[in-house]
Amino acid sequence: MTERALTRPGTARSALVRRWPVSEVLRTLQYELRDCGTRIETERAPLEPFVLPGPAYDELFTAATGLLALLRRAVLESAPTRAGRLAALGLAPDGDDYPLFTDDDPFEERYCAAMARPDVILGPQGPRFIEFNVSGAFGGPAETHLLSRVWTEVYGGHDGAPFTGHDPLEARAAFFDQVCQDLGLPRAVALVGSPYEQDQAATSRYYDIEVDVLRRRGLRAEFFEPDRLPHGLGLPERLDFPVGLRYFATADWTSRGQSLDPVRSVLAAGCLLLPPQSSYLLANKKVLAWLSEGLPWMTGADRALVGRYVPWSRVVGDTKADWHGRTFDLPELLLSARERFVLKKAIGMMGREVLIGLLSTPAQWAAELERALAEGDTIVQEYTESVPYELEMCDASGTRAERVAVAPVLSPMVFGGRPGGCYARYFPSGESGVVSVYGQGAMENAVLRGVQR
C-alpha cells in the first residue's frame, strides 16, 4: 500500500456526493450513536467515512490475520506451560494483570486469538501495525456497525453508496454461531459488560445493538451486568448460556471497586467466556517486539510479513540491538535519537503509558527510559508518521462542510479469522500523536471499501 493508495479511488471520490444537508447528517449521527459513547458534536463532526481502494482495504485484513497467527504462535512457543509463558513476559503467575484464567488449557489456547483489533498507521511506505488489542473489550464493533449504517443511508443506500465494508457485529455473531456448532453447545450467548463504561451511558443500548444482531442470526442472546451474575444465567440450577462475550476489561472493573467474583463463579460453572484470559498474553506488546527482533522458528515468509507491516520494535533493556544495519547499545541509541522512537508499556490501553520522543522533552524521555530500564516492562518502537487524509467534516460553525487533512489510526477487526470491519480514530485538528477516544478525546469513524457503481 503506497501513499497514492491512501487517497480515495477516483470513482469513489467523484461519487462521494452527500445527498443530505449538514444538519440532517448531524441529527442522524447523534440519534444513531446515542448512548454509545461516540462524540458527535456540532463542530468538526465527520460528514463522510474514510474510504480506501478495495485492494488497500483488503490488505489490512490479510495482514492482520497473518500477524495475529504469528503472535499466537510466539506466545504458545515461548514456554510449554502458562506459568512459563507468564515468566517469559516478566509476569508473576499469581499477579493482578491476568486474573481470570480457567483451568482448561486447551480452551485457553484454542481461542486466545479469537478476537483482535490491531491499530494501524498508514505511513509513506504503507500500513504499519503498531499494536494489537486482543480481547473482547476493545471499542469499535458497535461504533463501526452504526457509522457504516449512517454513511450508507447518507450516500445512496445499499444499492447506491460508493462503498461497502464488513460488518463487525455480523462477523462476531458468525463466530459465536461457529463456536456453538464446533463444541456441540446450545446456541445461546451472554454478553457480560457494564453500560457505564460507555461515557456513563444511561442505558445498555451499546450492548443491546449486538444482542439484536445475535438474535437475528437465531442465537439466544442477552446482556448481563455484573450484579445479574451468576443467577441471571440460570445458575446454580442450570447454565442457560454456555458461551459468553467478555465485554469488559478487568482493570476497569477493579479500578472502580467492582468485584470479579461473579465472573469467577460463571467461569467455575463452565460458561466459556470468550476470548479467554490467554488472549491478553497476545496483546502484551513485548510479543510484537519479539516478532520484530525475530524468533528461531520464524520462516523467511514470517520475517518478511513482520518486516513489511510492523515497525522496528524491541523490549527495552540494557542490551545491544541492530537498527538500520548497525549494532547499537540500545539505551544509548534511544537517548541519542529520541525523535525517532516511541516508548510503550507492554501492558496498557487507551493510549496510556505511551511517550512519543518527537513530542517529549529530553528530560521527560530520559526519565521514562530510566524507569523502563529498571522495571523491564516497556518496549520501544520506531516512530511512524501518518500520511494525511482529507476528510469532509463540519466547520467551526457546525453548519458548513470543509475538508481537513487528518492523521487517522485505523483498526481492522478480526473475529474467528473473519474480517470484521474497520474502525478509525483521529483528531479533527489534524494533529497526530497518541490517538485515543477516552484517553485524549479523539473522534471516531468507520473505514469503508470503495466500489464502482
Image (cartoon, grey):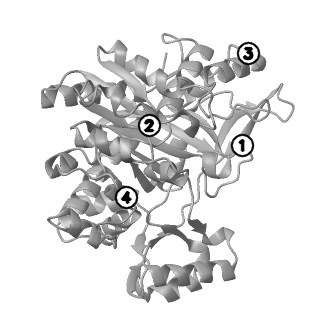
Check disc 3 and report the residue beneath it.
Answer: 24
Q: Are marks 1 and 4 in contact (CB under 8 Å)?
A: no
Q: Residues within 10 Å of mark 3 (few under 14, many from 20)?
A: few
Instruction: Say which residue label 1 marks.
Output: 428
Q: Secondary structure at mark 1?
A: loop
Q: Which callout, 4 or 3, points to the residue nearer the camera?
A: 3
Mark 1 closeness class: few <14, some 14–19, many ≥20 residues within 10 Å: many
Query: Disc 4 designates what residue?
Result: 308
Res 267 → quadrant: top left
Q: Residue at x 47, y 83 (%)?
A: 373
Packing grade of label 4 (10 A; few <14, some 14-19, many >=20) is some
Apparent side of residue 38 relative to residue 55 in the rendered image (left or right): right
Q: Is residue 378 visible?
A: yes
Closer to the chain start, of discs 1 and 3, is: 3
Q: Amino acid at mark 4?
A: Arg
Quadrant in the picture for residue 50? top right
Q: Earlier in the sequence, mark 4 or mark 3?
A: 3
Q: Amino acid at mark 1?
A: Pro
- Can you identify the residue that label 2 sits on? 226
Which mark is in front, 2 or 1? 2
Q: Residue at x 43, y 77 (%)?
A: 324
Please tell me which of labels 2 and 4 falls first in the chain: 2
